[in-house]
Amino acid sequence: MSIGTATPAGVLEAARALELALALKHPEASAALIRRLHAGSGVARRGVEIIGSDGGLQLFVPGERPNPTTAQRLALYSPSAGRLAVEASRRAMAGAGLGAGKDGGAGLITHVVTASCTGGLAPGLDRRLIDELGLRADIRRTHVGFMGCHAAINALAVAAAFARADGGRVLVCCAEVCSVHMHHSARPDRLVANALFADGAAAAVVAVSDDVRGPSVEVAESVVLPQTQGLMAWEIGDHGFEMTLDAQVPRVLGTLVPGWLSGVLERQGLARGDVAGWAIHPGGPRVVGEIAEGLGLSAGATGASLDVLREHGNMSSATVLFVLARLLGWDGDGGGGGAGVVGGPLVMAAFGPGLAGEVMVLRAG
């Protein structure tokens, strides 16, 4: 029915991001490598919650070689993720004609599905949404936790199943604060993550209804790619959540994913050429480029993914919903905003630790 998005007030422009990365550089890290990674990140600007009032980064101070604890990092995650989740959900509800409070229509939401992999707390994001948006006390709650960048598709699949089985309206919200897990490190994969990741939230309202204006969910499928378990990992350490990211990941995805996606389409009676729009999670420009090349996509077919990466960075699970909103011509405030894809199938695809892939085929109205 709608998609709402939210990003932090603090914005890190590319030049400032590189300046801070060099100022915070680990003594054993290569300044030349940091410059190359930032230049090739595809990110021009991104919202980050850890920008302080002085323009510096909270938790990280040049010259002090910081190593914040996980508890210190999560103390920033909790309020930030909640604030972003409420803002995105409020916009999605408004776009679906459901204002905050039971009298405003919030009481018509019967389920809430949340997703996040950059922190956790209980009571969680669902309770924050219930309290601040006036959702009903008997709302059904489900959390998709720690799955990584593809969790929005998992969450939407859960929402579609609830809507079909139980009726009602389902609020889906993905909220990520990746910036609290920046690492003071010389490891190339940690430096890549520092250059790419950002903060944001995206929400959607899903329902089975004749008057839904948005795309319909046709099918969702998953895959665990063989012999790739060690290529990407997201683990909780004593000093933040730690990423392992092998340099082979873009090539492996470009080799294995196109055949899998073609099989998903064939099971729906579709060919690659039938797809009207591609929402590929922009894990980085190389990931998007390798998958596009493997699929034989025309120039510009992945423009929405690269635009979101350039304007917002990689916001983990929230990102692919930003891309879908862009494809649909929706403005992220829950309403329209421009011409989008109509009258054809859309493919959402995202990838995460495992290596695992999630895909959803939607039909634009």
Image (cartoon, helix red, strand yellow):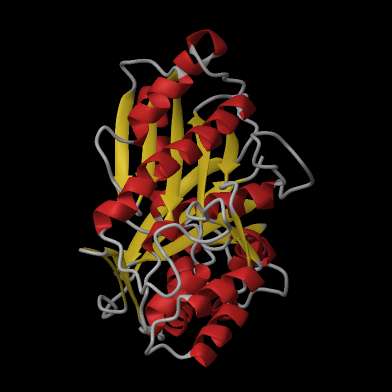
Which residue sits at x=63%, y=59%?
Answer: 308
Q: Name the residue at 44% across, 43% down.
A: 80
- Expressed as whole percent of the image width and height from the top left, the position of residue 10 reads 58, 52
Residue furthest toward the right? 339
> How many badges with numbers are in the image?
0
Task: Give the residue drawn at x 58%, y 76%.
Answer: 18
Give the residue drawn at x 36%, y 23%. Answer: 166
Across and down, in percent, residue 236 comes to 23, 62
Along the line of sight, the residue nearer the viewer: 177 or 184: 184
Q: In which quadrant of the rendered view does residue 239 lie?
A: bottom left
Image coords of residue 212 (percent x, y) = 60, 29
Q: Relative to 92, is 255 above or below?
A: below
- Is 144 on the left or on the right of 259, as rendered? left
Q: Is residue 102 left or right of residue 151?
A: right
Query: Quarter of the image holding residue 36?
Result: bottom right
**Residue farthest top in this picture:** 103
Quarter occupied by residue 306: bottom right
* Residue nearer the viewer, 233 or 228: 233
Residue 215 in view here:
yes
Residue 167 in sight from this viewpoint: no
- The answer to whether residue 166 is left or right of residue 48 is left
* Front one among 29 and 121: 29
Q: Quadrant of the C terminus?
A: top right
Q: With respect to residue 201, does 185 lie above or below?
A: below
Q: Nearer the viewer, residue 131 or 30?
A: 30
Q: Is residue 310 above or below residue 81?
A: below
Pinpoint residue 201: horizontal percent, then vertical percent: 50, 45
Extreme-front residue of the structure: 63
> In the picture, which quadrant includes the N terminus?
top right
